[in-house]
Image (tube, rainbow, N blue to C red):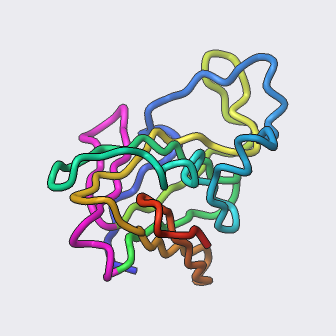
């Protein structure tokens, strides 16, 4: 993991007002289309394999990230994917983050936005900038333990 990854924490992230009716559970349909890596979930990441794109045209793909309350999680685009992909994360305080690596610091379960609890998973407005359709490798590190996943941004790639 690159040293000195930019940090997006509970206060600096773009605030998402939690639904008053949401149980905090990820619906099964959404979970089937998501990539899970320990405490991190990239919502809808498996649906991009058949997404049409024009070759040679950079594409921005929205892929919200949820991080379970607890220790920070660092996400890094794997070295073999860096020439073609970068992470993008919105921040309310400071400039948005764009690059190969980001450290996510989730909110505590008691944190509030608009008088509603954030809950056990902190949402981050995130996505990827892609130079071409490819299979993006991600390295997720929590407390020194690495987890590797792939996100399919073309039909020939299978997520892991």
Using the image as rendered, state which of residue 133 and residue 122 is in the foreground: 133
Instruction: From this view, report whether residue 17 is shown above or below residue 68.
Output: above
Horizontal side of residue 53 vs 83, given as left or right: right
Please report the bounds of the magenta region as a residue range.
Answer: 79-100
Please check the rendered image and state whether residue 95 is part of the magenta-colored stretch, yes or no.
yes
Residue 122 falls in image quadrant: top right
The picture places residue 31, in percent across and down from the top left corner, at: 73, 48
Query: What residue is at 38 percent from the left and 70 percent from the top?
Result: 77
Instruction: From this view, report whether residue 151 is shown above or below residue 46.
Output: below
Instruction: From this view, report whether residue 147 is shown above or below residue 152.
Output: below
Q: How many marks?
A: 0
Using the image as rendered, state which of residue 54 and residue 78 is in the foreground: 54
Residue 135 falls in image quadrant: bottom left
Please check the rendered image and state whether residue 85 is part of the magenta-colored stretch, yes or no.
yes
Query: What residue is at 27 percent from the left and 72 percent from the top?
Result: 82
Using the image as rendered, state which of residue 125 and residue 48 is in the foreground: 48
Query: What residue is at 76 percent from the left and 44 percent from the top?
Result: 120
Using the image as rendered, state which of residue 112 and residue 63 is in the foreground: 63
Query: What residue is at 40 percent from the left and 47 percent from the top?
Result: 127
The picture places residue 21, in percent across and down from the top left corner, at: 81, 18
Quadrant of the image containing the N terminus: bottom left
Farthest residue, direction left: 56
Quadrant of the image containing the C terminus: bottom right
Horizontal side of residue 131 vs 93, given as left or right: left
Residue 3 falls in image quadrant: bottom left
Horizontal side of residue 28 vs 149, given as left or right: right
The picture places residue 121, in percent across and down from the top left corner, at: 69, 45
């Amino acid at each position: 993991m690159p040293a000195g990854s930019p940090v997006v924490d509970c206060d600096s992230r773009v605030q998402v007002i939690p639904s008053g009716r949401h149980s905090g559970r990820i619906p099964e349909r959404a979970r089937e289309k998501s990539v899970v890596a320990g405490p991190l979930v990239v919502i809808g990441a498996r649906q991009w394999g058949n997404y049409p794109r024009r070759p040679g045209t950079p594409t921005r793909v929205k892929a919200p990230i949820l991080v379970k309350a607890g220790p920070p999680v660092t996400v890094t685009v794997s070295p073999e994917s860096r020439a073609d992909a970068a992470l993008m994360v919105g921040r309310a305080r400071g400039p948005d983050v764009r690059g190969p690596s980001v450290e996510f610091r989730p909110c505590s379960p008691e944190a509030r936005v608009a008088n509603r609890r954030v809950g056990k998973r902190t949402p981050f407005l995130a996505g990827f900038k892609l130079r071409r359709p490819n299979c993006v490798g991600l390295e997720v590190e929590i407390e020194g333990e690495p987890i590797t996943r792939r996100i399919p941004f073309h039909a020939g790639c299978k997520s892991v």
